[in-house]
Amino acid sequence: MALVVVAVCASLYSLPHAHARSADGFGRMERLLSSLRGSAESSGALGELRGAGEASAAHPLEKRQIYDRSCKGVYDRSLFNKLEHVCDDCYNLYRTSFVYSSCRRDCFDNEMFNYCVKELQLPSPGEYILIRDALRG
């Protein structure tokens, strides 16, 4: 019993120090991530991708991006959201950033988008192709 009390006291004594190290590590991680975000925005390759309207290629969790600049047709955010939901669902199915960024490339005019529409077994797949064509212009 005394051994248990000693072990509990020792763990309680060391707990604040472990917590402080974790908080310090968290602060360092935040600084590292913010510096990486800053350098990613200034890098040429990622800047070109962002310029093409593919902000999702840089980070797959940035899901709500602005309207894709490669879409030259009808500007209708609700139609664009329908196509984005196809890519989001496909990403949730496969969980790879390649699927997430490839599906949106060239205003959804690519094989990955067609594959996602087929694999998700959507009720009216032709509707999504028509929406894509309207957005493309």
Image: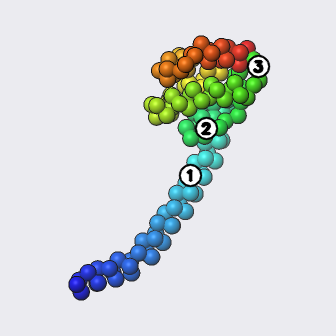
Which image quadrant for residue 106?
top right
Q: Earlier in the sequence, mark 2 or mark 3?
A: 2
**What residue is shown at x 45% (from left), y 76% (from top)?**
16
Q: Earlier in the sequence, mark 1 or mark 3?
A: 1
* Residue 116 screen position, x and y as percent: 51, 22
Which image quadrant for residue 57?
top right
Mark 3: few/some/many CA within 10 Å (<14, 14-19, 20+): some
What's under tag 2, amino acid-wise?
Answer: Lys
Mark 1 to mark 3: distance in Å?
37 Å
Q: Which residue is mark 3?
A: 74
Whether residue 91 is situated above or below residue 5 in the rendered picture:
above
Q: Quadrant of the C terminus?
A: top right
Residue extending farthest bottom: 2
**What residue is shown at x 65% (from left), y 17% (from top)?**
132
Which image quadrant for residue 13?
bottom left
Asked which secondary structure carries label 1, the reply is helix
Q: Earlier in the sequence, mark 2 or mark 1?
A: 1
**What residue is shown at x 62% (from left), y 18% (from top)?**
128
* Residue 51 screen position, x and y as percent: 69, 30
**What residue is shown at x 60% (from left), y 30% (from top)?**
85
Mark 2 to mark 1: distance in Å?
18 Å
* Residue 92 screen position, x and y as percent: 49, 34
Mark 2 to mark 3: distance in Å?
22 Å
Asked which secondary structure carries label 3, the reply is loop
Q: Which mark is residue 102?
A: none
* Residue 32 screen position, x and y as percent: 55, 54
Residue extending farthest front: 123
Q: Which mark is residue 63?
A: 2
What's under tag 3, amino acid-wise?
Answer: Val
What's under tag 1, amino acid-wise?
Answer: Leu
Q: Which mark is residue 33?
A: 1
